[in-house]
Amino acid sequence: MGLRRRVCRTVIAGTLWPEVTEEHARGSLRTALWKLPRTDPALIRRGGGSLMISPSLGVDVHDLTDTALAVVKGREPPGVRQPLGALTGDDLLPGWDEEWVLVERERVRQLRLHALDALAEALTLQGKPALALEAAWESVRREPLRESAHRAVVTAHLAEGNLYEALRHYEAFRRLLNEELGVEPTSRFAGMLARAGALRTTDSRRERVPLPDWR
């Protein structure tokens, strides 16, 4: 319910008590609601056949998704001074393996990754490459084989004029991708280095650089 803000009573009862009859599950839900602490405003609000959490009750995943959506849309996140801090943290409900959790966890994970990539790009355009690298590396740590995150790292290096660092990172990612998946980076990625004069795409004798541990 905290994830979806408003949920049908029957759905909640069936999720929490899946191995009993619907009538028994609804009865267990009524008992659980009755045992909740009496607060003003109430923690759980009732509306028809649905239940909603109180607007005064903070939910961390809502803060994360609201920030991520704002960043992806190119807007200022509401009430957030440092978006990068709001985009870090653990995955959703680690250790839970219920199907509905897996779906929600992947949705939030993908949204977070897109937001980190977008934030890195925005910070680079704002002339803040160091902060852009922080956002890009957070994305890399979460998914080492995601090319867009590595492109963000290289873009920040190029913005500072650090051609060697850009090339070093590209070559390390190229080797990682080849070792793990047997494929090469996209022509778009190689083209970034070629346009910057840091990579000759026809040269097969590339420098062997240390491979960072991103996994």
Image (cartoon, helix red, strand yellow):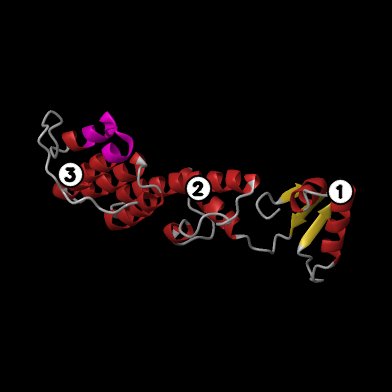
Magenta segment includes 64: no
Eye-nearest disc, 3 or 1 = 3
Residue appearing at x 50%, y 54% in the figure: 77
Q: In this view, does 91 lie above or below 121?
A: below
Disc 3 marks which amino acid?
Answer: Leu
Mark number, residue 98: none
Q: Which residues are the magenta region?
A: 177-192
Q: Do residues under tags 3 and 2 come within 8 Å of each other at their CB atoms?
A: no
The residue that label 1 is drawn on is 48
- The residues bearing labels 2 and 1 have C-alpha atoms spaced at a distance of 32 Å
Q: Do residues under tags 3 and 1 come within 8 Å of each other at their CB atoms?
A: no
Is any part of residue 74 visible from this angle? no
Helix, strand or loop status at disc 1: loop
Helix, strand or loop status at disc 3: helix
* First-in-chain label (3 vs 2): 2
Helix, strand or loop status at disc 2: helix
The residue that label 3 is drawn on is 167
Residue appearing at x 58%, y 60% in the figure: 60
- The residues bearing labels 3 and 1 have C-alpha atoms spaced at a distance of 60 Å
The residue that label 2 is drawn on is 109
Residue 149 x/y as whole percent:
35, 45
User: Relative to residue 47, is residue 168 drawn left or right?
Assistant: left
Disc 2 marks which amino acid?
Answer: Arg
Residue 45 x/y as whole percent:
80, 58
